[in-house]
Image (cartoon, rainbow, N blue to C red):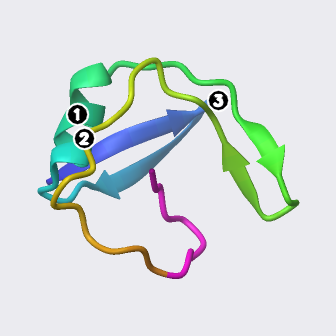
Amino acid sequence: MAHTITINSTSFKATVNESKAASNFMALLPLTLSLQEFNKTEKIAGLPKRLDTSGSPSETSAKAGVLAY
C-alpha cells in the first residue's frame, strides 16, 4: 500500500509491506521525528514505542531510499 512521507517540505511516496512492524509503525502516524546523521551514510531516529518484528522479512543490505527498522 502506498503512503506519503514528508521530510521538511519534500514529500515522497512509500510502499509499506504487510509485516507486524509495518502495521505497528503505521499506527504511530502521524509522527514527527528528529533525524540524526549516522556513519555519514544514513539518518536515524528513535520511535516512541518498540515495534513487533515477529514475522518480518530478514535483514537485507541497505539501499538508498529504504526506510527500515
Q: Which mark is residue 24?
A: 1
Q: Which mark is residue 52?
A: 2
Comparing 46 with 64, the one in front is 46
Q: Main secondary structure of the magenta part?
A: loop
Q: Position of residue 2 (x, y in %)?
A: 21, 52
Q: Name the residue located 14 percent from the left edge and 54 percent from the top edge.
A: 1
| 58 relative to 46, above or below | below
The quarter of the picture where residue 51 lies is top left
State the separation of the CA atoms marked 3 and 2. 28 Å
Q: Residues within 10 Å of mark 3 (few under 14, many from 20)?
A: few
Horizontal placement of 6 versus 16: left or right? right
State the separation of the CA atoms marked 1 and 2. 7 Å
Q: Position of residue 52 (x, y in %)?
A: 25, 41
Query: Which of the two discs, 3 and 2, labels the residue nearer the N terminus?
Result: 3
In front: label 1 or label 2? 2
Horizontal placement of 9 versus 22: left or right? right
Residue wearing tag 3: 8
Q: Name the residue located 24 percent from the left edge and 46 percent from the top edge.
A: 22
* Circles 3 and 2: CB atoms closer than 8 Å: no
* Residue that extends furthest to the front in the rendered view of this protein: 54
Comparing 51 with 63, the one in front is 51
Q: Residues within 10 Å of mark 2 (few under 14, many from 20)?
A: some
* Circles 1 and 2: CB atoms closer than 8 Å: yes
Q: Position of residue 66 (x, y in %)?
A: 49, 64
State the separation of the CA atoms marked 3 and 1. 23 Å
Query: Which of the two discs, 3 and 1, labels the residue nearer the N terminus?
Result: 3
User: Type of residue at label 3?
Assistant: Asn
Query: Which of the two discs, 1 and 2, labels the residue nearer the N terminus?
Result: 1
Tell me where the magenta segment starts and ends, as one range: 61-69
